[in-house]
């Protein structure tokens, strides 16, 4: 149980940082880079679902 809490907190922190950098990238008018970052954040969060199913 402790491992899942640690893993979830790391995934949440990484996802929030990637999304905030994507917002910063949009403000600098780099739409393509921002979309790539949002896709990467989505796949990071989605990949953790497998860990919690087991």
Image (cartoon, rainbow, N blue to C red):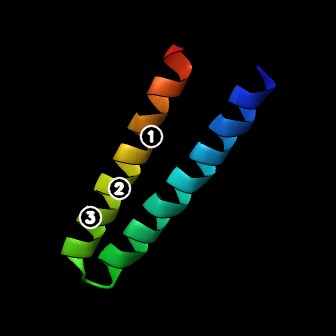
How far is mark 1 from mark 2, CA to CA? 9 Å
Extreme right residue here?
Answer: 2
Sequence-first disc among 1 and 2: 2
Sequence-first disc among 3 and 1: 3
| Residue 52, quarter of the rendered image | top right
Residue holding disc 1: 45
Question: What residue appears at the point 34 percent right and 63 percent down from the top-left corner?
Answer: 37
Residue 39 % position (x, y): 29, 53
Residue 12 % position (x, y): 59, 44
Residue holding disc 2: 40
| Residue 29, quarter of the rendered image | bottom left
Quadrant containing the C terminus is top right
Residue holding disc 3: 36
Q: Height in image: 46 above or below 13? A: above
Q: Height in image: 48 above or below 50? A: below
How far is mark 2 from mark 3, CA to CA? 6 Å
């Amino acid at each position: 149980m402790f491992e899942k809490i640690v893993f979830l907190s790391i995934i949440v922190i990484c996802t929030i940082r990637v999304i905030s950098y994507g917002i910063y990238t949009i403000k600098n008018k780099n739409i393509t880079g921002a979309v790539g970052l949002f896709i990467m954040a989505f796949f990071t969060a989605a990949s953790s679902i497998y860990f919690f199913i087991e």
